[in-house]
Amino acid sequence: MRKLTGLLVVALSLAGCAEPEKSPPAPVATHAPSSPIASGKRPPNVLFIAIDDMASVAGCYGDPVAQTPHIDALARRGVRFDNAYCQLPLCNPSRASLMTGLRPDTIRVYDLDAHFRDTKPDVVTLPQLFRNHGYRVERVGKIYHYNVPAAIGTDGLDDPPSWDKTTNPKGRDKTDEHLVINAEPHRKISAALSWLAADGTDEEQTDGMVATEAIRIMEANRDRPFFVAAGFFRPHTPYIAPKKYFDQYAIGQIRMPYAPPNDRDDIPPAAFAHNCPVPNYNLPIETCLTAKHAYYAAVSFVDAQVGRLLAAVDRLGLADNTVVVLWSDHGYHLGEHLGIWQKRCLFEESARAPLIIYAPGAAGNGTPCRRVVEFVDIYPTVAGLCHLDPPAGLEGRSLVPLLRKPDAEWNGAAVTQVLRPGDGSGMIMGRSVRTAEWRYTEWNGGRAGAELYDHVNDTGEFDNLVISDPARAAKIIAKLKPLLEGRAQPGPPDSPVHPKRL
């Protein structure tokens, strides 16, 4: 039997079980005619693991500091996607897009409050597809959007048709919020650089409870096909983890990322996140390093919970018939470009996020994939691995060919967008396309600025060719700009949004 212990497949945020389980109405179809279950076959299980706000901060992604043995082991066992990009680097839009297989412009979700069913009431989500085909489908923790930490222990902005049952744990990270250190007291801890080296055990924390409950669900359903979504809340702010994870890192190991002194000179103002208006929030570098230390501790804590899930898959004898998918909803800035933090940007660190998929028996297992892929590709991929026909109209494409042969010809291009409040002159839409060689970004169709970066020679995105070499840039942009059309609109939407929730 293949051992999955210590592996991360696809991150599906799980929560604990402090609140009673909820049972939504039964799905429209229990055993669709094309269902493998109806045909008498035992289809693969799915363990869907979501991690909140995790940058590519893992040893397998080349981070020299991160201690993530379980994620790293999974990357060696499955297929690690080195260039996977979210559709909008903000929790709610990213998750809604991934779970529906539709782009933000299609579902009209750009902020933290909109629900995709307001515009697409009949859409069939990824877990709903499995539910309609007879799987046992349960969620623990954060899969759709939650306000973190305020909504921990509730359903958050959930989607009842997606699940047979939901469980919403609430651990001592909630009861101990008064102990959190907030480097920016004028902000809520959800939006500030804030952290806590917590007392107690892993299992007392919400994410530890998520892992415990997800394991219980797999144990209870080991003899039937299941889709278990486990959603972890960390490393989202506040960065909370038991003290032992802080102790894994020496503060001297932590460094601020390199950027040239003039890095910001060629970047349009619209490119900087509106929630991080000044470099490093105008905090001392020592404070930023302490916050980054806490972020790494929170990542290692989540890694340990992923390890618990995968050890349970081994123990239950399910490793040969369980697809594991690990993802984070978007990337995360930790001081890049002279002081950007968190998300909401279209630079590489915010748009790119971890994605690891383990499919039993896939020929590509153990080989990284460097092709450019998108999060809307996850839905058709998981459906295909389990022999389910996805609904018509999905906007991604199946990654199954890359799971078979990670270096297969692909010609991928990833489109990421973000909507921001303007400076009094209206909203600003940014849209960006990433290919194997380039990133092109434009703000309000270029009227509020544009950026072009050469990813063969400038992986840090320090030299904006729109400024430094406009003639060359114009020729390249002419080839890249058509890749944006039909995938992200150039300007702000006509649909209502909440500027304070962008």
Image: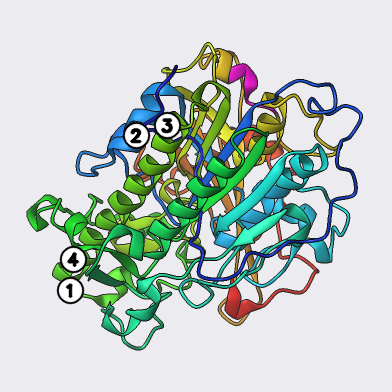
**Visible residue check, residue 350:** yes
What quarter of the picture does the N terminus occupy? top left
* Residue type indicated by callout 1: Pro
- What is the CA distance from the residue labelled 1 to the residue labelled 2? 37 Å
Labels 4, 2: front one: 2
What is the crowding at mark 3: few (fewer than 14 residues within 10 Å), some, or many (at least 20)?
some
At 36% from the left and 40% from the top, the residue drawn is: 307
Residues at marks 1 and 3 touching, judged by CB atoms closer than 8 Å:
no
At 71% from the left and 54% from the top, the residue drawn is: 163
Which residue lies under the disc numbered 4?
Answer: 290
In the image, 389: left or right of 61?
Answer: right
Which residue lies under the disc numbered 3?
Answer: 315
* Residue type indicated by callout 4: Thr
Q: Nearer the viewer, residue 120 or 170?
A: 170
Labels 3, 2: front one: 3
Which residue lies under the disc numbered 1?
Answer: 284
Labels 3, 4: front one: 3
Dot placed on the residue nearer the N-terminal end, 3 or 4: 4
| Majority secondary structure of magenta residues | helix
Q: Extreme bottom residue here?
A: 186
